[in-house]
Image (tube, rainbow, N blue to C red):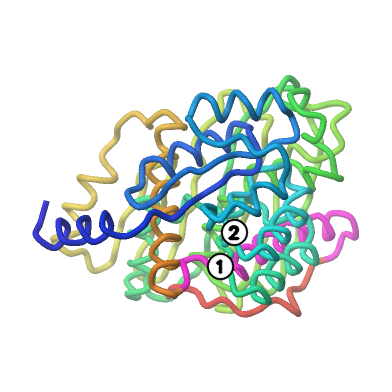
């Protein structure tokens, strides 16, 4: 540990912890709980769920408070941050209640299932002066950070194309595991809204503001499920770049997601947790080192273990923002834009016409 790191750790330890409470007890709530408890300066205070038995088990296993009602959670002065980890279609209700109570909000993807509802969350948090951080933990991975840095430095030249691919598998048992899963009312969509939103967010993070999208969706292997299990789309970006999205939850075997960017002077890609391409017209000695660290073939880590450091980094980002009075590295508007890309694909698939992002706030590309 360097002297600077040691000093920072000491400063963090000297400050009162930032208290977190989680709404929801599903699998993603367990990831958030683990990440919060691993961050110096964060304190997991409690949990709320409408299911009394699940609430009690979750709280007992972690030695935290089981809040019987959301009102009790929001009234607890130890709680400064509320983690919204409920079904997607309930996010606006819970996030806006947290904001009204003066709590910062860490909201699972998507912010909600429609752009108007997501915008309502953004407005509520702004009105009450609290931070809203959408959960896009993949941005905090080493490979994604390296690509973003290369784009910001202009190393790819003019960005030409991007590709986001998610060949995943979800069985019918997955959709039966919760009454809300695979429904338009609470899931808001299928493979795009629930799973590929992380991959789509990375693509937009790298390429910037989209101008229009044209897409197709279908339900090919999950009979009786309302929402899509397969989708393809093409995009045009304000920079002039073009992109492709391919997503499915019908693939066996399931493979890691890939986000690739090609420019006039280089090509980069992240596959799962590692760089799968790192090539430049003007390579440097540092590229050789980075390639050895992040591109060298190796087994992809277990999904849960791969997610953990990224979730932890997002909690750290939020705590830094709270303590500094600044903002985290992901804006609320970026959370809304990911939803607009997806609902734009749905609209295009329904109408057979491109969806145009006329009202979206401009988010610059890294190049």
Q: Position of residue 281 (x, y in %)?
A: 28, 67
Q: Quadrant of residue 100?
A: bottom right
Query: Is residue 75 placed above or below 64 in the rendered structure?
Result: below
* Labels 1 and 2: the sequence-earlier one: 2
Of helix, strand and loop, which mostly describes the magenta segment?
helix
Q: Position of residue 33 (x, y in %)?
A: 49, 38
* Left or right of residue 366, residue 117 in this image: right
Q: Quadrant of residue 247?
A: top right
The stretch in magenta equals 327-353
Tell me the SS state at disc 1: loop
Residue at 45% in and 56% down: 139
For label 1, count other residues whose C-alpha is less than 10 Å away and answer few (under 14), some (14-19) or many (20+). many
Pick out the residue farthest to the top.
173
Q: Quadrant of residue 314?
A: bottom left
Q: Position of residue 280 (x, y in %)?
A: 29, 63
Q: Which mark is residue 131?
A: 1
Cβ atoms at labels 1 and 2 below 8 Å apart? yes
The residue carrying mark 2 is: 105
Residue at 20% in and 57% down: 10
């Amino acid at each position: 540990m360097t002297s600077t790191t040691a000093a920072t750790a000491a400063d963090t330890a000297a400050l009162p912890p930032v208290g977190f409470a989680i709404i929801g007890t599903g699998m993603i709530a367990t990831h958030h709980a683990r990440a919060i408890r691993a961050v110096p300066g964060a304190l997991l205070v409690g949990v709320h769920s409408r299911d009394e038995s699940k609430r009690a088990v979750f709280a007992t296993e972690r030695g935290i408070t089981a809040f019987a009602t959301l009102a009790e959670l929001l009234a607890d002065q130890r709680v400064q941050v509320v983690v919204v980890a409920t079904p997607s279609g309930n996010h606006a209700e819970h996030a806006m209640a947290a904001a009204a109570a003066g709590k910062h909000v860490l909201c699972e993807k998507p912010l909600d299932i429609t752009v108007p509802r997501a915008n309502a969350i953004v407005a509520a948090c702004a009105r009450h002066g609290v931070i809203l951080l959408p959960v896009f933990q993949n941005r905090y991975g080493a490979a994604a950070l390296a690509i973003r840095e290369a784009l910001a430095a202009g190393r790819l030249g003019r960005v030409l194309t991007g590709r986001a691919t998610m060949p995943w598998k979800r069985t019918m048992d997955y959709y039966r595991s919760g009454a809300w899963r695979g429904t338009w009312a609470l899931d808001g969509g299928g493979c795009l809204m629930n799973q590929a939103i992380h991959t789509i967010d990375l693509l937009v993070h790298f390429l910037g503001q989209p101008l229009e999208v044209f897409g197709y969706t279908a339900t090919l292997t999950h009979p009786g499920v309302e929402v899509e299990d397969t989708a393809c789309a093409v995009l045009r970006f304000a920079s002039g770049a073009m992109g492709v999205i391919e997503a499915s939850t019908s693939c066996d075997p399931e493979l890691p997601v890939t986000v690739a960017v090609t420019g006039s002077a280089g090509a980069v890609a992240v596959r799962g947790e590692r760089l799968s391409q790192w090539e430049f017209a003007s390579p440097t000695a540092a590229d050789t080192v980075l390639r050895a660290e992040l591109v060298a073939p190796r087994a992809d880590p277990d999904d849960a273990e791969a997610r953990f450091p990224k979730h932890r980094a997002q909690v750290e980002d939020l705590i830094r923002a709270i303590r500094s009075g600044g903002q985290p590295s992901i804006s609320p508007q970026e959370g809304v834009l990911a939803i607009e890309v997806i609902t734009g694909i749905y609209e295009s698939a329904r109408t057979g016409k491109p969806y145009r992002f006329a009202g979206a706030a401009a988010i610059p590309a890294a190049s």
